[in-house]
Image (cartoon, rainbow, N blue to C red):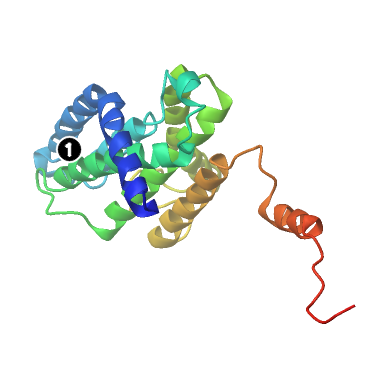
Amino acid sequence: MPPGVARRAVLRQLLWPSLRTIGWLRFGVIVALGVVVVRSGGRNDGDPATVALPIATTMLGIWLSMVFEDTASEITRPSPVPLWLRRAVRVSIAIAATGVAWSTFTWLGPLDGATAQMAEMAVAVAVVALACAAVATRLVPPARTGMVAAAGLVGVVHAVPFAIATVLERPISIDPSHVVIGDPLTYWVTMSAAAIAVLVLAHRDAAMPPFRVSILASARRAPLVPARGSR
């Protein structure tokens, strides 16, 4: 079977189990609560973009932080399919669902779609949630990873900035356009880049040596083949 056909077959086989085991009930509850929060934020001529939408965005991030929860991990760990590929399928489904829900939030009440700052925060929250989930799977039992990852998400996105704002005597705000340090674009991009780095490192196989070391080891083990015509 050609590699491309085999890869597509594996992805199709992973799709249904991922769809079936993702926590859709929790997702539905969070989306419903998010709608209530955003619509409530628009009452009395309020602006949901400053408080309500960031709260709803964080709620979706909390659901994303639970996407790696797997009570059957002890059974599926010996699978020949790499862990990163199995998780990539789950993440693709979860991100698609989260994107649809979040886009819907940005059109509720007086909101007329997403601004750049809203989108930057949403991306940062999603990546931080996945990074916290990946780290939690390495530190705590599978059944508790969601709670630990959710706590990590709230800490990184809200608690730590609040602490920094308190130390620097700056206004405390969850408005994505008012960040504690620097400009919004730099702030959210930096947070996203750091979370991506953590996410990649958390999926590195601990049994494999570092890339540079493995190359040097392979070079040392490679047999010396004399050039043609040499003695």
Under mark 1, the amino acid is Val
The quarter of the picture where residue 63 lies is: top left
Image coordinates of residue 86 in percent, x first then y, are 40, 37
60 in relation to 120, above or below: above
66 in relation to 218, above or below: above
Q: Residue at x 41, y 43 (%)?
A: 172
> Residue beneath label 1, please?
38
The quarter of the picture where residue 185 lies is: bottom left
Q: Residue at x 19, y 27 (%)?
A: 28
143 in relation to 172, above or below: above
For the C terminus, give its image quadrant: bottom right
Q: Name the residue at the bottom extreme.
A: 229
Quick check: 20 left or right of 216? left
Number of numbered callouts drawn: 1
Image coordinates of residue 180 in percent, x first then y, are 45, 51
**Observer able to see residue 62:** yes
Q: Nearer the viewer, residue 171 or 191?
A: 191
Q: Nearer the viewer, residue 116 or 13?
A: 13
